[in-house]
């Protein structure tokens, strides 16, 4: 890539690319708002994104983490998390992921947490979101960064 990759908050011009990236990976595209993400951008192109979602009890979740396929394993995902959690000071932060991504999040300071230790609101979201997947594939875990 010719240009330098920059990391910044998203704006309305990024939305269609963010949405396409998340949809292609089957990730949650509910309640997408223009400035709700942190993105890695090269020129006009969105290379990756993530966002913080706030539960109605005030707990927060790292969600919608994605990097375009041909740009993975170059540190972009890590940098997005570091920028996002640098600007979001509230802790703890929760997330749901697949086993194959566990190491990636552990490098950013997340640890696996058992469901019975989760706050009620997030536990309900976990039940809705990954319980079915767990039953079918045995995959899906919850992580926390304190
Ligand atoms: C998960 C994802 C966001 C990681 O982004 P990335 O930019 O490739 O990650 P980084 O380059 O910052 O990776 C940093 C380290 O995490 C680890 N890591 C990243 N992806 C990994 C993988 N698939 N398997 C094992 N370790 C991985 C590696 O240790 C890597 O360091 P290394 O390349 O020096 O070995 C990206 O692979 C992706 O978009 N995957 C598909 C969508 C997805 O699963 N999103 C998460 C939803 S929970």
Image: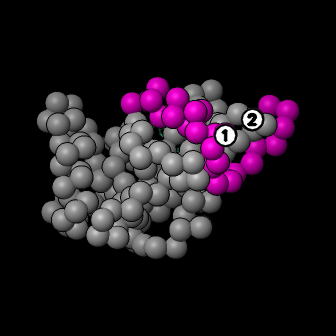
**Label 1, label 2: how many angstroms apart (C-alpha)?**
9 Å
Relative height, residue 88 to residue 36 (above, below):
below
Query: Which corner quadrant holds the C terminus?
Result: bottom left
Mark 1 and mark 2 in contact? Answer it, CB < 8 Å.
Answer: yes
Pointer 1 residue? 13
Q: Residue furthest right?
A: 2
Q: State whether residue 130 is above or below residue 125.
A: above
Residue 44 image label:
2
- Residue 21 screen position, x and y as percent: 53, 31
- Which stretch did the figure color magenta? 1-26
Give above or below for 8 relative to 97: below
Whether 144 is among the magenta residues is no
As drawn, is 27 to the left or to the right of 87?
left
Within 8 Å of ligand 1, the CB of disc 2? no
Quarter of the rendering occupied by the N terminus: top right
* In this rendering, position of residue 20 left or right of residue 135: right
């Amino acid at each position: 890539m010719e240009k330098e990759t920059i990391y910044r908050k998203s704006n309305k011009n990024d939305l269609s690319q963010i949405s396409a990236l998340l949809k292609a990976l089957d990730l949650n595209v509910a309640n997408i708002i223009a400035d709700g993400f942190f993105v890695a951008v090269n020129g006009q192109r969105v290379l990756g994104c993530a966002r913080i979602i706030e539960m109605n009890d005030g707990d927060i979740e790292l969600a919608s983490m994605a990097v375009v396929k041909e740009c993975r394993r170059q540190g972009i995902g890590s940098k997005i998390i570091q920028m996002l959690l640098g600007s979001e000071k509230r802790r703890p932060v929760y997330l749901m992921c697949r086993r194959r991504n566990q190491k990636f999040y552990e490098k950013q300071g997340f640890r696996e947490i058992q469901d019975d230790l989760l706050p009620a609101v997030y536990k309900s979201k976990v039940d809705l979101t990954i319980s079915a997947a767990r039953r079918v594939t045995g995959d899906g875990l919850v992580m926390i960064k304190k």
